Structure formats: C-alpha cells, structure tokens
Amino acid sequence: MTTSMQAIRQHSYGQRDVLQLENVPTPQISADDVLIRVHAAGVNPVDWKIREGYLQSMMPHEMPLTLGWDVAGEIVALGEQVTGWQIGDAVYSRPDIGRNGAYAEFVAVRASEIAKKPQSLDWQQAAAVPLAALTAWQALFEIAQLQAGEKVLIHAGAGGVGLFAIQLAKWRGAEVYTTTSGKNAELVTTHGADHVIDYTQANFADLRDLDVVFDTMGGEILAQSWQTLKAGGRLVSICDEPDIATAQKHQVRAQFCFVQPSAAQLSEIAALLDAGDIKVVIDSVFPLAQAALAHERSESGRARGKIVLQVA
C-alpha cells in the first residue's frame, strides 16, 4: 500500500485556479472506514459551490480541501470494525460531504456509505450515479412521495440530476413534464419525459394542476413554479429554501432537499441500473489533473448528463 498519492487540493476558497494537483499522504482510515482506490469521481455543482465558498456557513471545511463526493473504485483497506466487505470489492458511494473527497487516488469512506458497484456499468458510469441519482430519489420518493399516475414537473431535465429524476419518476409510473432547450428534447424524451417544455419557445409557468414540482434551478424558476401546482401539491427544491408562507398561500407543501448518503438506496438504484430500468448519461470525462476544466464545464450549465474525472 503506497503512503502517498496524487490529489487535487485547494488551500483557500476561490476561482478554478485554486485547484492544484499535489502529492499528499494517503488518507488514514478510522475503525468504521474503508479505503477506496478511486477509479473515477463524479463532478457536481456542489463541488464548485464549495470551492468558491458559497456553502461555508452551512458546511465549514478545513483547508487544504479535496473536493468530490461521487466515487467508484475498489476497496484496498478495511477499518478494524468493518464487516461484510472484502479487499478488492468494487463499490460506489456518495460519501460524507464534510470530509475530504474523491478528486484523489484514494479516499477514506465510512463503510455504512458504500454499496456494491452496479455490475453493468464501467467505472466512469458508476461514478456518475451516486450523488445525482440519490438527489433525485430522495427528492421525489422520500420528500415529495411521488405516486403512480401523478403529474410531476422536473426542471432542467437534461442535467445530471434531471435525467435521473425523469427516469425514476417514469419508473414509479408518473406522468413526466420537463423543461429543457429544444436541442435536448430528444435526449429527455428517450429517457422517459412525456411532455417537453422548450424554455426558448414556451413558458412552463402556464402549466396547471401538477402534483409535484422538482426544482433544480432556484431563483425565478422556483418563484414561477408555485402557480403550476394544484392545491395539496408538493414542491421540492435542491437550490433554494422554499418560502413557507408562499407555500401556504398556494395550499401546497414545500421542502428543501440536501442529499444524504444512503447505502440502501444506492443498492436499490444499482438494481434498477443492472435491470436497464434507468441509464447513465455521461456528458464528458476529464483526467484528474484537469479538474479545473471539469469545473468550467459544470459551471457553464450546459452539461448533458454527468461530468466525470478519470482517476485510475
């Protein structure tokens, strides 16, 4: 086992140039951790929001910091309290966002946060799943309690979270509306969207009598979403804390969703992936050393599906 590794680290909050490829000690693991050799790591908007310091009041990180909370790799060491796993097991995870992440050759993750990698996926595809798919799962199923036959609007359907949300809602038996640009209409339709609102041509705010809105945009998009819901409807946002007074005025329930690790849900998602019920869409793959370019792509807001760092 090597004692040092390459990792992308930042020593301060800031723009993309704070991301540096450095040689650092391999992480020490706690009794309930596994050490994962990282094959690939997913890149998510939360990464650059943390990099810039947007979320430091909510999640104060110690510097230097390694970003990246989407990982696929193999177990190379086990903490002394870990049972049920073996060295060499292929796993994937959305680990604790309070710890150092997976923009590195190795990452320490709690054994309770890992699940077996979907067998049908390669490393890059597997790394693209956990954070985005868990976000969609928890927003739609845990918080909104989406049921078969209900109408759900998913904003930004061509994004990493949006594509998983469309597929999971369709699997659940819902009628799926989504917003995207015209050039992505075919992408979202082939992944299960029943109704596509091209935001360059039409206004989603004209919709009415929806059961659920899944807001992945915040701001003005969230503000215009209230009127699309029927009384008793539910709104879930992953961007902004919805205003409870506004929700009461519209006679709907509203909640913020910040994704949590869940090995059990990752196991269910792996089964859906292996059965072909949901699929992974990868926008682009960058080598670890080009993490800053991966962030530039994510910040553009134009990614179709997920951005991945190839590590091993």
Image (cartoon, rainbow, N blue to C red):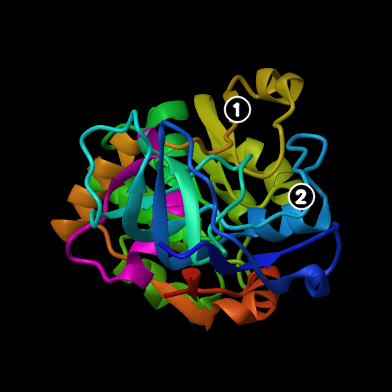
Spatial CA distance of label 1 from label 2 is: 17 Å
Check the picture and name the quadrant holding the C terminus. bottom left
Q: What residue type is labelled 1?
A: Gln
52 vs 85: above or below: below
Q: Residue at x 79, y 50 (%)?
A: 63
Q: Which residues, given as a range, are shown in magenta?
A: 112-132
Q: Quadrant of residue 300?
A: bottom right
Which residue extends farthest left? 275
Residue on which disc 2 sits: 220
For residue 137, which quarter of the picture? Answer: top left
Nearer the N terminus, badge 1 or badge 2? 2
Q: Where is residue 121 in the image (x, y as percent from the top left)?
A: 24, 67
299 to the left or right of 7:
right
Q: Determine crowd level at label 2: few under 14, some 14-19, many 20+ residues with C-alpha closer than 10 A.
A: few
Q: What residue type is labelled 2?
A: Glu
Disc ID at residue 105: none
Q: Residue 195 location, x and y as percent?
A: 40, 59
Q: Is residue 130 magenta?
A: yes
Q: Is residue 174 visible?
A: no
Residue tagged 1: 255
